[in-house]
Image (cartoon, coloured by chain):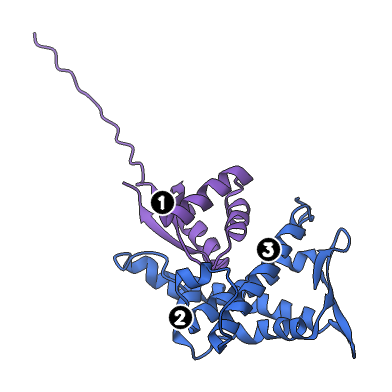
Amino acid sequence: MLIHRLNEDSIEFADIEPIEADLLRQIPVLCDVRGDSRAESRLFSNPADSGEVQFLTDWEEYVRPELRHIFVSARATVEKDLGTMVDRAGFPSRLVILCAHGEAWLNALNQARLILATKFEFSDEELSLHEVPRSFSRRDLVLLQINFYAAIQERIIDTLEGCTDADGRE
Amino acid sequence: MAETVVQHETKVEIGTPWNVVVHNDPVNLMSYVTMVFQKVFGYSKEKAQKHMLEVHHNGRSIVWTGVRERAELYVQQLHGYLLLATLEKSD
């Protein structure tokens, strides 16, 4: 798979192999944390220590719903973009997204990586490891998946540099 | 005759400054954290990278200090980018 700027407004994911397409399609599914309290607590981490009672109460009431909206919107944008992926049997797929959707992609990819890392309880050392695993257990494959999403994030950040924001800023 | 001097003291209460602290998280990429600091605080790439490296090496970085309301807003924005950020009273 190649990720590059197609033009001023768009980013192209070209030559997407079937396994890569499958991993991309998993992003919005993974972002759904309903019923997973550990993943929820990572996405909605504490903004202050417990002594800030009023602040934490207000945060729960007003900020948390806004954060949820940001996360759900990012997921929805990615899901909608993935719906436009061009598949042809026997050929790699192709996807074009707007630069303006880049942040939503970064957010959704981050959600997916954080959720996987929390679910599988990866340590800091494991997450920093860039060695080829000796075995291919489910856990090892999930770590590869996390790193695959990280690589996509890196490419999107690279391609976004120089993209014009929706409000016209560089 | 003794002269009485009346001193008027005007006390200006200056709010305690608050810190916005970002904590290390092995999942968030260094390039992503740098980009977020640039977007949220308008920092130059160099300044954003300096804070990102502080987070990476020291486990935390005070990325902004100032009035409480603004600090709260920054913490909220950082959480929107899924960074581990907290509000702390400045020493």
User: On what subunit does the disc labeled 3 rest?
Assistant: A
SS type, badge 2 = loop
Mark 3 lies on residue:
A154
Tell me the amino acid under the disc marked 3. Answer: Glu
Tell me the amino acid under the disc marked 1. Answer: Asn
Name the mark on residue B19. Answer: 1
In the rendered view, would you say B2 is above or below A145?
above
Q: Earlier in the sequence, mark 2 or mark 3?
A: 2
Q: Tell me which residue sits at (68%, 63%) in the image.
A: A154
Residue B27 is situated, as x and y percent measured from the top left of the image, at 53, 69
Q: Marks 3 and 2: in contact by CB < 8 Å? A: no
Residue A39 is situated, as x and y percent measured from the top left of the image, at 49, 81
Q: Tell me which residue sits at (62%, 73%) in the image.
A: A147
Mark-to-mark CA distance, 2 and 3: 23 Å
Residue A89 is situated, as x and y percent measured from the top left of the image, at 90, 91
Q: Tell me which residue sits at (58%, 86%) in the image.
A: A136
Mark-to-mark CA distance, 2 and 1: 30 Å
In the rendered view, would you say A50 is above or below B35?
below
* Residue B20 shows in the view: no
Nearest to the eye among marks 2 and 1: give it.
2
SS type, badge 3 = helix
The shade of chain B is purple
User: On what subunit does the disc labeled 2 rest?
Assistant: A
The shade of chain A is blue
Tell me the amino acid under the disc marked 2. Answer: Glu
In the picture as drawn, the residue positioned furthest to the front comes out as A134
Nearest to the eye among marks 3 and 1: give it.
3
* Numbered-mark total: 3
> Mark 3, residues whose alpha carbon is within 10 Å: few (<14), some, or many (≥20)?
some
> Mark 1, residues whose alpha carbon is within 10 Å: few (<14), some, or many (≥20)?
many
Name the mark on residue A121. Answer: 2
Residue A107 is situated, as x and y percent measured from the top left of the image, at 63, 70
